[in-house]
Amino acid sequence: MQALFYTGHERMALQQAEPQPLAPGESRVQVEATGICGSDLHAYHGHDPRRVPPMILGHEAAGRVVEGAWKGRRVTMNPLIVCGHCRYCRSGRQNLCENRSMIGMNRPGSFAESVTIADSSLIELPATLSAEVAAMTEPVATALHGIHRLERVLDRPLAESSVLVIGAGAIGLITALVLRGRGVRSLRIADLNPLRRETAERAGLEALDPFSAAPGENSVEAVFDCVGAGPTRQMAVACTRPGGAIMHLGLQDNAGVTDTRAITLKELSFLGAYTYSLEDLHAAVALLDASALGELSWVEHRSLSEGGDAFHALANGRTGAAKIILHP
């Protein structure tokens, strides 16, 4: 089969690969659509020691099962393969499984004509949901998981709060669209890239350049940092009002100094969120099937053979697309 390999620092190559043999309890999915995640881009830059080249990246996918117990079913998938018996799995927090593995990280990923995955990770798709839209289940679930964690610590509902989303990439844009759908009226999204700000504005969001129109100090009750860099953490702490909350979703770097004194004096809740639960994934499928994010013109579609160029465009800020979906 053909697969897009990460072969080294900022290098991707379309190569032939042997399909993985099926283990007991697994199915083979013919990939029809697979999205490029920010973590894939992180690996592309050589910043993720967990993803060692040469390897097949990709973990946002939808397609049809061609081998295994689920043969014939249209599916998306939870890219996390969990043990089901550790304390986190038993308590319903499978995303923190002590024994988890993940396609596109320590197992071959979905940038290929097919991928093998545990049957327990498969989610059947409704007939009304296309594979190209269903491939966004994973990032939508990531946004939902972060929103659920943050709203539990606020004194008032999110819909009544002023909210800033930092970063208009896929997770940031999706987070903002989900928040809008939940009735958040005071909502802005910040990004340095003018192409991405234009994309956000076309999606009906208020976008700002944090350099020229920085959010004011103590101006919002909640921040979703979907970049996760030193300057964005600094901005998040500065602009959150006393008693507010920050959800740290991005993983760009671990640099800079976070103002823990301000976090303490302002009594802020500073939270992290890692991936999603199985319930988040099912909820994401339902949202996508209901077209709850609105029109999806901000999603770009390319063939798998164009994957290398897509990574290069994303890495150099030459596309306004918040999400690129590849089609094997």
Image (tube, rainbow, N blue to C red):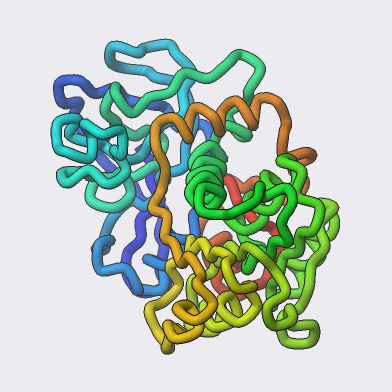
| Residue found 58% across the figure and 16% down from its top | 126
Q: Quadrant of residue 260?
A: bottom left
Residue 176 visible (yes or no): yes
Q: Is residue 328 above or below residue 45?
A: above
x, y percent for residue 148: 52, 44
x, y percent for residue 84: 19, 30
x, y percent for residue 257: 42, 88
| Residue found 82% across the figure and 63% down from its top | 206
Say how many tags the image has: 0
Q: Is residue 69 above or below residue 59?
A: above
Q: Is residue 246 above or below residue 234?
A: above
Q: Is residue 65 above or below residue 141?
A: above
Residue 304 visible (yes or no): no
Question: In this view of the protein, which residue sits in the foreground, 94 or 66?
Answer: 94
| Residue found 76% across the figure and 69% down from its top | 195
x, y percent for residue 235: 60, 81
| Residue found 81% across the figure and 52% down from its top | 185
Q: Quadrant of residue 7?
A: bottom left
Q: Quadrant of the N terminus?
A: top left
